[in-house]
Image: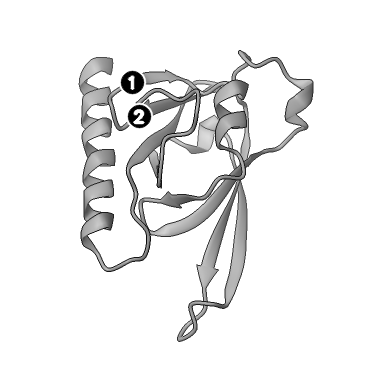
Amino acid sequence: MSDQTYTKHVAAAIRRTIMGRNKSRAPGHLTWGFALFGLGQEFRVVTAGGEGLAWTVALLDEIRGAPVWIWGRVPALIDAMVTIEDLEPGMPVREIRVTAMITGFGNSADYSHLETTLVPATCIHPYVFCAPSRPPGWPP
């Protein structure tokens, strides 16, 4: 599959995820998303609008700490593994921390969290993250 075909395929999966989530009875409305996957030693990003690009420190800085939903279902936060202020904005991101918020049975007000580190080598398939709005500095 060519890079362009793959990007279109992933962008369509993101849009289907957003539509599926918004049709469900889950609270909140999602309007934007991106997929994250590894390619060699770097992360790549595909947006819902079909933009494919390297994930840089500048893009991570715009989304870190903002609520996202993994595959439109699991609320999560994304953050850097290092002090981001020490890095150049155009540098590629080599690893990230994802904290998923897991609800307990019967009481959705009780959350626990699951934290994991993602590196490009472990992201051979795209992870789709959806959000209520597009962060500043991100393409559509």
Would you say the residues marked 2 and 1 are in contact, meaning their CB atoms lie under 8 Å apart?
Answer: yes
Amino acid at dot 1: Glu
Q: Which residue is mark 2?
A: 47
In the image, taking residue 100 as reference, residue 1 lies left or right, namely left
Q: Which of the two residues, 131 or 104, is positioned nearer the viewer here?
A: 131
Residue 21 percent across, percent down from the top left: 28, 56
Residue type at the position of mark 2: Thr
In the image, is residue 25 above or below residue 9? below
Which mark is on residue 140? none
For marks 2 and 1, give the CA distance. Answer: 5 Å
**Residue 41 appears left or right of 35:** right
Which quadrant of the view contains residue 34? top left
Residue 2 visible somewhere in the drawing:
no
Secondary structure beneath disc 1?
Answer: loop
Q: Name the residue rendered at 64%, 41% in the picture.
A: 79
* Colour convention: one colour
Is residue 99 rendered to the left or right of residue 135?
right
Mark carried by residue 51: 1
- Snapshot quadrant of residue 93: top right
Asked if residue 2 is positioned above or below residue 95 in the image, the reply reads above
Picture residue at 52% right of the left edge, 50% below the top: 67
Label 1 crowd (10 A; few <14 / some 14-19 / many >=20)? some
- Tell me: residue 86, above or below residue 79: above
